[in-house]
Image (spheres, helix red, strand yellow):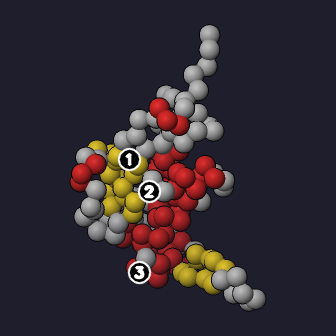
Amino acid sequence: MKTYMAKAQAVERKWYVVDATDVPLGRLASKVAAILRGKNKPAFTPNVDTGDFVIVINSDKAVLTGKKLEDKFYRYHTGYIGGLKEVPYKKMMAEKSDLAVYEAVRGMLPKNSLGRDMIKKLRVYKGSEHNHAAQKPEELKLF
């Protein structure tokens, strides 16, 4: 019996809409990362991008459990000496919740060229409106 190995040209890609309302950020990110990676398909191949497109709406209504809103920080470095910046998640979820969801998902994807291709299939919006109606996305219930 032979093992099926997916080819990048033969992958059928679908579009999904995920509503982030009242969903914990980490659980949302792990489910979305699995769909972007293609782990929900029987033809999953680790070295081929077999994932689907995902649209996340209502990112401003995602929740952080416990005291993470006060204690957790988004850290990045500017590249200059002493350029470490910290943004508390309370401020980030209020102002740039789409970036918080994007970075949470990106951290759960492979750290190589395959992961960089996968993250390009993610679209995150603060409100409930998106401009991808032409792709006929299916609504996906995570929880």
How dense is the environment of label 2, judged by Cα within 10 Å: few (below 14), some, or many (20 and up)?
A: some
Which numbered disc, 1 or 3, marks the residue closer to the eye? 3
- The span from disc 2 to disc 3 (Cα, nearest Å) is 20 Å
Q: Label 1's element? A: loop
Tell whether label 3 touches label 1 (CB within 8 Å): no
Which mark sits nearer the N-terminus, 2 or 3? 3
Residue 47 appears at what percent x and percent y?
63, 38
From what the image shows, is residue 87 above or below residue 101? below
Which mark sits nearer the N-terminus, 2 or 1? 2
Say which mark, if any, is on residue 95.
Answer: 3
How dense is the environment of label 1, judged by Cα within 10 Å: few (below 14), some, or many (20 and up)?
A: few
Residue 102 appears at what percent x and percent y?
48, 64
Inspect the image, locate mark 3, and give the three-letter code of the amino acid beneath it. Answer: Glu
Inspect the image, locate mark 2, and give the three-letter code of the amino acid beneath it. Answer: Leu
- The span from disc 1 to disc 3 (Cα, nearest Å) is 25 Å
Q: Residue drawn at (51%, 56%), measured in percent from left and top?
A: 119
Nearest the camera: 41 or 88? 41
Residue 26 appears at what percent x and percent y?
51, 58
Inspect the image, locate mark 1, and give the three-letter code of the amino acid beneath it. Answer: Leu
Tell me where residue 124 sits by quadrant: bottom left
What quarter of the picture does the N terminus occupy? top right
Say which mark, if any, is on residue 142.
Answer: 1
